Image (cartoon, rainbow, N blue to C red):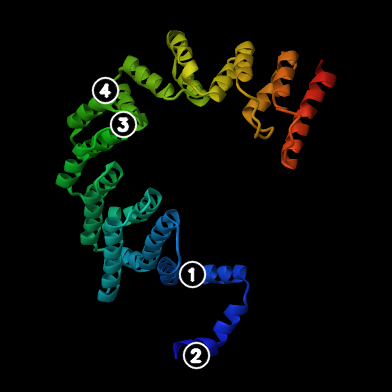
Amino acid sequence: MAKKRKQDDPLATLLETAPKAKLVDLIVRVAASRPAVRRECLDYLNRHTALSPSRKKQSEGENLLALWAELAPDLDELDAYGGGDYDADIHVSSLLQEITQALSRKKIDADYRQKLLDNALPYIESGNAGLDDDWWALAEAFESMGGDWKIDHACRIYRRLDNREKYLELRQRKLATGTDYYDLTDFHWKAGERQKAMEVAETGLLKGKGRMDELRQFVAKRVESAGNRERYLALQFDQAIDPLTCDKYKAFRKLCTAAEWKSYETKILAQLENARDTEQLRIRMHRKEYEEAMAVLTRSRYPLYAWDSTYELQTARRLEGRYPEAILKYYFSGLGNLKTNAPRKEYTRKAQVMKKIHHVLVDVL
């Protein structure tokens, strides 16, 4: 009977005659503004098609975001009015529970978890939707999964829910990066526990591994206010070389007096070899150290898949008049092997390199 109904349905007849691309376009357009329809499509495809593991994980992540999109309008209303009618409350709560269960039960990719959390945090922070129990359940779901990433986000939710005990319990469990220590420092500082905040920050400067920017700037601001110029500059120096870039170099130079720069210039240049080649090149050109810039440029390969707008090729153009033979050799390295067959795109690229070589031979040399 069901089969007969399908055959008699004019829509089914039209769908059977439509090209695949048109069907895909139709479904995407219909589902785009209807989260419940999008979720039903994802569920159907999960059940009735053979998906690769990566596609299945993608489908589960998209399903999670579709759930969020479905509850978002009601959640906006609850947040705007400090709560709402019973039906809206139940609808949002039930969908949040589905999200919580999906997070606990399935291996949702980190990108989807992050998008979900980015969407949820403003509502948690406002605390005006009357759904604190559901946010609590979401935090508990993250906590139960274990792992640094999940603990971090559970920690952030507990903090926004003003649950000091749970926040501190989880934060103490994970104090590894500078960002971890800064989060705890900021918590104590905003709670008016200034001495405790500084103790945590100083410990973080000693023990934190990576992502130290916020923590260093926090301490630097306080020591500057206390009049400790020497410590302030030491912290800003550490900031400048982690990692060293031309922008950071210039910013640090601007902070220093002439006497202070004289003390730090040698130290910062000693760190130059640890910087990326492009940043080394930028700094050398900024300092008008053209010979050193040439050494950096020519020890690296010609950028085979780069446009003329790349900094390396812009710099090569600037140095043609000073070091034409060396730049000519650099351009020749961009031709690669001329005896092998290549796609049309590669021939076009090599023609552009030949144009540069012709320019140096005819116009410069």
The residue identified by callout 2 is: 4
Give the quadrant of residue 303.
top right
Kindly identify which numbered label has been placed on residue 31: 1
Give how far apart the Cα atoms at labels 2 and 4 are.
Answer: 75 Å
The earlier-in-sequence mark between 3 and 2 is 2
Do the residues under discs 4 and 1 have CB atoms within 8 angstroms?
no
Check disc 4 and report the residue beneath it.
Answer: 206
Question: How far, Cα to Cα, is label 4 from label 3?
Answer: 10 Å
- Residue 227 shows in this picture: yes
The structure residue drawn at horizontal position 62% and vertical position 78%, both measured from the top left corner, is 17
Query: How far across and down, in percent of the image, does residue 271 sit?
Result: 45, 15
Disc 3 secondary structure class: helix
Residue nearest the viewer, comparing 284 with 231: 284
State how far apart marks 2 and 1 are (Cα): 27 Å
Check residue 178 in the rendering and tell me which mark sits there, or answer none. Answer: 3
Q: Amino acid at mark 3?
A: Gly
Q: Nearer the viewer, mark 2 or mark 4?
A: 2
**Distance between the Cα atoms at labels 3 and 2?**
66 Å
* Residue farthest toward the right in the current orientation of the protein: 362
- Residue type, numbered disc 4: Leu
Q: Is residue 46 above or below residue 178?
A: below
State left or right for residue 275 relative to residue 314: left
- Callout in the foreground (4, 1): 1
Q: Is residue 87 above or below residue 163?
A: below
Q: Nearer the viewer, mark 3 or mark 2?
A: 2
For the residues bearing labels 4 and 3, Cβ distance under 8 angstroms: no
Label 1 neighbourhood size at 10 Å, few (<14), some (14-19), many (20+)?
A: some
> Relative to 169, is 127 on the left or the right?
right
Compare marks 2 and 1 and give the one earlier in the sequence: 2
Residue closer to the observer: 258 or 99: 99
